[in-house]
Image (spheres, rainbow, N blue to C red):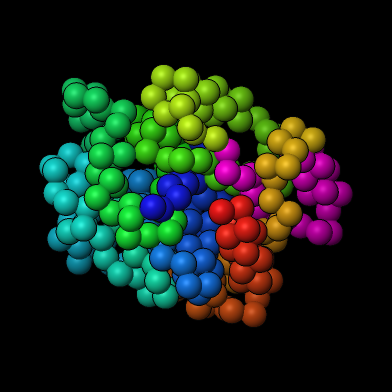
Amino acid sequence: MANVIAIINQKGGVGKSTTAVDLSAALGAQGKRVLVVDFDPQGNATSGFGIDKDDLNLDIYDALMDNKPIRDVIVASCAQNVDVAPATIELAGAEIELVSVMARESVLRYVLDPVRDAYDYVFVDCPPSLGLLTVNALVAADSLLIPIQCEFYALEGLSKLLESMRMVKGRLNPSLDIFGVLMTMFDVRTTLSRQVVDEVRAYFGEKVFQTLIPRNVKLSEAPSHGLPINLYAPTSKGALAYDALALEVISHG
């Protein structure tokens, strides 16, 4: 049965989609079967695997709102052992349409149930908000992976996310927990980056991964080529960091 992990932070630009794409590809290269559920209407994880949204017959919206089987939505990616449930801008409408749906917070969980035994990991790439889509991800997930950028005010707003997690845990998903906290865009040359890492470790303790994802040009370039970093620049610092992170994730279970 897959470990369902929501990659979540309501701040934008912290590396959620980059992590969804590159961690999945690194785990796939280790022989793990991975499904990436692109749950952000921007569809960055979909594009990150080079999937042309204009060529899609179905996307995650169709599974969520039109009861299409998730197996019909899933497409193979360019990465070994990695499949994708893609997203298009159509998903933006689901935020409003879900309001009138019965058991609206649990729709994604029901959608994913039929394929959980086909994968080792399911990563849900969440939108940068705490609306109904994100609540669905929290209910569907076993745990959360929280990317945090190494910048000033890194912890700002996280209290709201943790409060939402506690509410969902208390009312809808008792087993929900934090899988890990990932420091992204780390710049070894700056005192600020090191201070932020120390601050986050003091706050989250052992939940913080040892692997630090560096600020890396190749990581920034890879999405524009529609490739995960281990296919675009396999020897780059970014690729090596996600390879190390994959081993940490596997060791976590």
Question: In this rendering, is residue 167 above or below 67?
Answer: above
Could you say which is closer to the camera, residue 37 or residue 29? Answer: 29
Q: Residue at x 20, y 62 (%)?
A: 56
* Image spot of residue 61 (x, y percent): 22, 45
Can the viewer see residue 42? no
Q: Residue at x 47, y 46 (%)?
A: 5
Question: In this rendering, is residue 90 above or below 158?
Answer: below
In the image, is residue 182 part of the stretch drawn in magenta?
yes
Magenta residues, as a range? Answer: 178-201
Indicate left or right for 196 with 179 as reference.
right
* Image spot of residue 146 (x, y percent): 58, 43
Q: Residue at x 20, y 47 (%)?
A: 63
Q: As drawn, which residue projects farthest toward the right?
A: 191
Q: Quarter of the image holding residue 103?
A: top left
* Image spot of residue 72 (x, y percent): 17, 59
In the image, is residue 11 part of the stretch drawn in magenta?
no
* Image spot of residue 129 (x, y percent): 45, 33
